[in-house]
Amino acid sequence: MATEADVAVLVGLQASGKSTFYARCLSDRYELVSKDLFPRKARNKQGRQMRLLAAHLAAGRAVAVDNTNPSPQEWAPLVELAHAHGATATAYWFPPDVTGALRRNAAREDRDRVPDVGVLATLKKLRRPSPADGFDAVHQVRFDGRGGFEVRAA
């Protein structure tokens, strides 16, 4: 558990490395909230996500929201809820690498694979987050070429 409540909002295409980044870099300090963990036919995934986020924040826990979160429409409610609970909101921006994302996505199996059109539709909505969006910090995340990640202030 993190010492301070923070909402880490992962922003990027499907298969951009967000879930792997969470597992390797944040999982020891942040609880995970992701619509991908809900049953496929679950209703009102957004409402469910917000309730889980609020419960973690009320308990003083740091939370990572691992979805594509491509635009202010998706991340603004997360930032607002973080601040309402006295937590910070940190964006982790995964700049688009369409070729790499499509290649990694093609290697996925079953439910984990997203139709290519889904990746391309996310690309059309994808916007780089900034402090002007209410984030307390924005970090850029890229693969480091050695199986890890390079994180720097964006």
Image (spheres, rainbow, N blue to C red):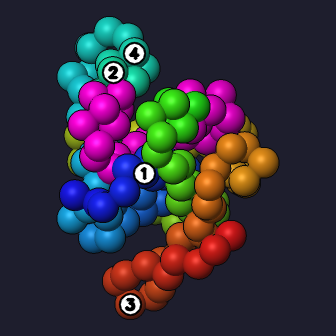
Q: Reading the chain from its start, which is encountered first: label 3 or label 1?
A: 1
Where does the image place residue 57, in percent across and percent down from the top left?
34, 37
Mark 2 or mark 3, earlier in chain: 2
Q: Nearer the viewer, mark 1 or mark 2?
A: 1
Which amino acid does the dot numbered 1 rest on?
A: Asp
Q: Is residue 142 magenta?
A: no
- The residue that label 1 is drawn on is 6
Neighbor class of circle 3 (other Cα within 10 Å; few <14, some 14-19, many 20+) is few
Q: Is residue 122 visible?
A: no
For residue 89, above or below residue 33:
below
Q: Given the image, on which type of amino acid does mark 2 rest? A: Arg
| Nearer to us: label 2 or label 3 | 2
Residue beneath disc 3: 146
Observer-nearest residue: 80 or 43? 80
Disc 1 secondary structure class: strand
Among numbered discs 4 and 1, the one appearing first in the sequence: 1
Q: Residue furthest right?
A: 132
Label 4 neighbour load within 10 Å: few <14, some 14-19, many 20+: few
The Cα–Cα distance between marks 4 and 1, rounded to whole angstroms, is: 20 Å
SS assignment at label 3: loop
Region of the chain picked out in magenta, as a range: 53-79
Return the x and y of residue 128 as percentages of the image width and height.
71, 53
Three-letter amino acid code at the position of disc 4? Gly
Judge whether residue 61 is colored magenta: yes
Q: CA distance from mark 2 to mark 4?
A: 6 Å
- Tell which tag, 2 or 4, sits nearer the viewer: 2
Secondary structure category for the residue under label 4? helix
Q: CA distance from mark 1 to mark 2?
A: 16 Å
Alpha carbon of mark 2 to alpha carbon of mark 3: how far? 37 Å
